[in-house]
Image (cartoon, rainbow, N blue to C red):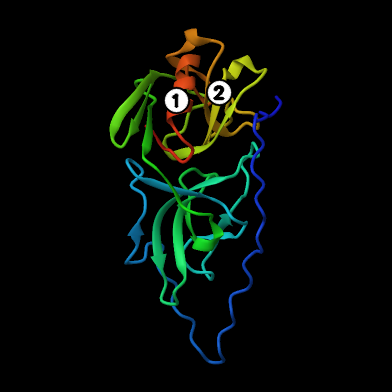
Amino acid sequence: MPRFRPLLAAAALAVGVAVGPWPSLAHGAAPAALPSANPAGQQQLSNERTETRWAYAADTRPVYSRPSGRARPVTRLRLLTEDDFPNVYLVLTRWVDPGGTEWLKIRVPMRPNGATGWVRSEALGGLRITHTFLRVNRRTLRLTLYDRGRKVMSARVGVGKASTPTPAGRFWIREKFHVQGVPLYGPRAIGTSAYAPTLSDWPGGGVVGLHGTDQPGLIPGRPSHGCIRLRNRDILRLYRLAPVGTPIEIV
């Protein structure tokens, strides 16, 4: 199946220089203890309900398990999504180490779902903020969008069948684009940070997306390979109301 082709080209992002080696210790000096994965004195930046901060990747530096360049790397930042849009990271907390380096704890779009890690603040672009929150209930087959805690939209949905389920967890909107020439996906598509445990309707076989459909009679239901389907009128409304960076909770 061919990949989606966005109507608008993704903005070009310059790739920065990767982080260099950690400085060597003076002869005989004992290495400082690594900070914990959740050090004291963090400043919360997102509650993932009414106020969420996010940023694009500025380069491809490592993401660490703890706020230290000597910690275990979890992965590296990626500049682009699978569909060649600028990649989006949710920013959870901020911490400044004793040496004055500012660290940001982020949610990372990768397998397994739910990964978090730490990056130096300069590894991300400027922080942006959204006040929307999206909940998808797989039991009631209903999607609800909130803005500053107030419900602004509700719609019935189709989710993954038992053999190809839609995953539960905390995710976010990474990309939005128009769809042309693929009636199966309706007029709009929204890419998320979630990855299906097996495959999904999304080209490439893994990303969980929200999109329209040419089979509205299957909604509400469990017809998909992991993606979340909406009637076309509903995906058009959601596309308009839910910006990039909107956190998603799938229950």
- Spot the residue most to the top: 217
Can residue 159 be seen here? The reply is no
Can residue 59 be seen here? The reply is yes
Residue 183 coordinates in the image, percent (x, y):
62, 14
Q: Which circle marks residue 195 in the picture?
A: none
Mark 2 touches mark 1? (CB < 8 Å): yes
| Foreground of the two, 145 or 166 | 145
Q: Please give the name of the residue rendered at 53% of the width and 62% of the height, measured from the top-left corner.
A: 122
Q: Is the C terminus in the top left, top right, bottom left or bottom right quadrant?
A: top left
Mark 1 neighbour class, 10 Å CA radius: few under 14, some 14 to 19, many 20 or more: many
Q: Real-space Cα distance between discs 2 and 1?
A: 9 Å
With respect to residue 127, does 27 lie above or below? below
Residue 47 coordinates in the image, percent (x, y):
33, 47
Q: Please give the name of the residue rendered at 47% of the width and 15% of the height, measured from the top-left corner.
A: 233
Amino acid of disc 1: Leu
With respect to residue 22, does 124 lie above or below? above
Q: Please give the name of the residue rendered at 36% of the width and 43% of the height, measured from the top-left corner.
A: 48
Q: Please give the name of the residue rendered at 43% of the width and 38% of the height, measured from the top-left corner.
A: 246
Mark 2 neighbour class, 10 Å CA radius: few under 14, some 14 to 19, many 20 or more: many
Q: Which circle marks residue 188 in the picture?
A: 2
Q: Is the N terminus in the top left, top right, bottom left or bottom right quadrant?
A: top right
Residue 84 coordinates in the image, percent (x, y):
65, 39
Assign a secondary structure to mark 1. helix
Residue 160 coordinates in the image, percent (x, y):
49, 23
Q: Which residue is mark 1?
A: 238
